[in-house]
Image (cartoon, grey):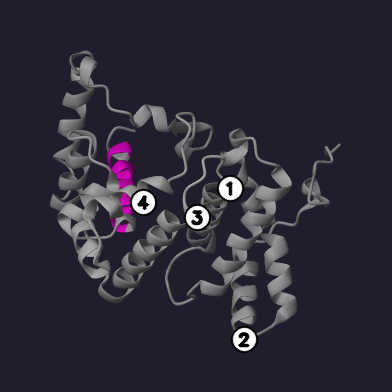
């Protein structure tokens, strides 16, 4: 017997599930302006929203509020999804939903950030986003500061101020029942000698990767750089760094499977 768990008055145990074919058919109808297809598609992807908000369950927020915010992210993903791109809708939608949830948590953070800092942060993000779309390249902090005619330190401070604190227990990668948590990716400089065998294995695995994958993996896991730092250094977007990193990890896993 299904347990009745309600969020926003919705019995989550009875949410519909759409096949990939059904999703594709509905997406075509949505782009043609079919309102009924749009509503059916939203209802068929509410389980996706539920799966995403579970990542934020340790923030002490009301699940109903998170669900509503997640639905906004889902709707934005539907409106912006490009059918010509060879990518599944869920792959595109999950980051959109997460982004909407993080904006909500950031704006409702108990640690209040002044309006002027928030305004500057939004200007910085807008400039970076516009440049990334037009040039397909991430702006550096120095370049953003020049465009906005502000100090570099001010740009760094405002971006830091609007970041949502993350739990060390937050999953950053998962496959089946196995998950990698943020704490698994924290570098421990004091105990590097205890993990020399892992470093040897990683070094051997890197030899099997192409030049770009090898460069990114070395900077990420041997030098302890963030994805944003790597993106700025080699001149691509953080999303591209993330995609290349994931492909490299999958390649390494296939080698040692």
Residue 89 visible in the snapshot: yes
| In front: label 4 or label 3 | 4
Q: Residue at x 17, y 35 (%)?
A: 223
N-terminal-most mark, 3 or 2: 2
Residue farthest to the bottom, as pictured: 32
- Residue for badge 2: 32
Whole-angstrom CA distance, mark 4 to mark 3, is 15 Å
- Residue for badge 1: 108
- Seen in the image, is 165 located left or right of residue 3? left
Vertical comparison of 130 with 68: above or below = below
Labelled pair 3, 1 in contact (Cβ < 8 Å): no
- Seen in the image, is 61 located left or right of residue 221? right
Q: Residue at x 84, y 41 (%)?
A: 4
- Packing grade of label 4 (10 A; few <14, some 14-19, many >=20) is some
- Packing grade of label 1 (10 A; few <14, some 14-19, many >=20) is few
N-terminal-most mark, 2 or 4: 2
- Residue for badge 4: 159
Residue 139 visible in the snapshot: no
Q: Which residues are magenta?
A: 240-253
> x, y (%) of residue 224?
22, 35
């Amino acid at each position: 017997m299904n347990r009745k768990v309600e969020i926003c008055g919705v019995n989550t145990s009875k949410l519909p599930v759409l096949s990939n074919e059904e999703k594709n058919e509905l997406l075509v109808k949505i782009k043609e302006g079919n309102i009924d297809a749009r509503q059916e598609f939203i209802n068929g992807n509410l389980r996706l929203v539920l799966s995403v908000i579970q990542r934020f369950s340790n923030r002490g927020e009301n699940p109903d509020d998170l669900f509503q915010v997640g639905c906004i992210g889902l709707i934005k993903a539907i409106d912006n999804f490009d059918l010509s791109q060879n990518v599944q809708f869920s792959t595109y939608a999950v980051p959109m939903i997460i982004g909407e949830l993080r904006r909500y948590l950031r704006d409702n953070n108990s640690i209040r950030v002044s309006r002027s800092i928030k305004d500057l942060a939004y200007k910085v993000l807008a400039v970076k986003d516009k440049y990334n779309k037009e040039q397909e390249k991430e702006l550096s902090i120095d370049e953003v500061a020049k465009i906005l005619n502000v100090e570099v330190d001010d740009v760094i401070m405002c971006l830091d101020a609007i970041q949502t604190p993350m739990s060390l227990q937050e999953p950053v990668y998962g496959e089946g029942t196995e998950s990698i948590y943020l704490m698994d990716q924290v570098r421990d400089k004091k105990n590097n000698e205890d993990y020399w065998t892992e470093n040897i294995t990683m070094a051997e695995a890197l030899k099997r990767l192409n030049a770009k994958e090898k460069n990114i993996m070395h900077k990420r896991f041997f030098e302890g750089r963030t994805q944003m730092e790597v993106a700025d250094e080699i001149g691509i977007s953080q999303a591209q760094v993330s995609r290349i990193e994931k492909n490299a990890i999958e390649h390494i896993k296939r080698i040692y499977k």
